Amino acid sequence: MALTKSDRIELRLTREQKTEIEQAAALSGRSVTDFSIPLLVKEAEQIIRVERDLRMSKKSWDAFNEILDRPAKPVSGLADLLKRPSVFED
């Protein structure tokens, strides 16, 4: 089922920007609208996702920092591993 497209966005561009976008749309066999919308939506989704992923409540932030502030626990065998010669040395 096709969605009705009724909303519009107006953009102000330089002549060069408009020409470049029109050329890219034509080269890809699409209208400027069909060329532009997926790119704008993808960028918007990425910005929204980053904003959502990086935000957390004060309670969550405090809990996260409390975990980071805990003393490191010894890892069995790590000290011995670090004493061995590197496999990347000549």
Image (cartoon, rainbow, N blue to C red):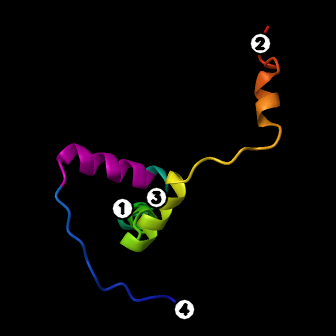
Instruction: Name which residue lies at 55% across and 53% down.
Output: 70
**Residues at marks 2 and 4, CA–CA distance in whole angstroms:** 62 Å
Vertical arrangement, residue 83 with respect to residue 53, above or below: above
* Viewer-nearest of discs 2 and 3: 3
Q: Secondary structure at mark 4?
A: loop
Is 21 left or right of 66, judged from the image as shown?
A: left
Question: Label 4 amino acid?
Answer: Met
Query: Which is nearer the N-term, disc 2 or disc 4?
Result: 4
* Rendered image quadrant of residue 83: top right
How far from the left and from the top, in percent, is residue 52? 42, 69
Report, in whole angstroms, how far the alpha carbon at label 4 lies from the one at label 1: 23 Å
Identify the residue at horizontal 24%, vertical 72% (top origin).
Answer: 9
| Residue 34 on image: x %, y % | 42, 67
Return the x and y of residue 33 as percentages of the image width and height. Answer: 36, 67
Q: Residue at x 33, y 53 (%)?
A: 22
Is label 4 or label 3 in front?
3
Q: Residues within 10 Å of mark 4 (few under 14, many from 20)?
A: few
* Residue carrying label 2: 89
Can residue 42 be seen in the rendering of this structure?
Answer: no
Q: Mark 4 near mark 3, Cβ–Cβ under 8 Å?
A: no
Residue at mark 1: 32
Which of disc 1 and disc 4 is earlier in sequence? 4
Q: Which mark is residue 1?
A: 4
**Mark carried by residue 80:** none
Label 2 close to label 4 by CB (< 8 Å): no
Q: Callout 3, which amino acid?
A: Asn
For the residue marked with disc 1, what is the amino acid? Val
**Which of the two labelled residues, at mark 2 and mark 1, occupies the earlier sequence position?**
1
User: Pointers 2 and 3 in contact (CB under 8 A)?
Assistant: no
Q: In the image, which residues are magenta? A: 13-26
Q: How far is disc 4 from disc 3 in space, using C-alphas?
A: 48 Å
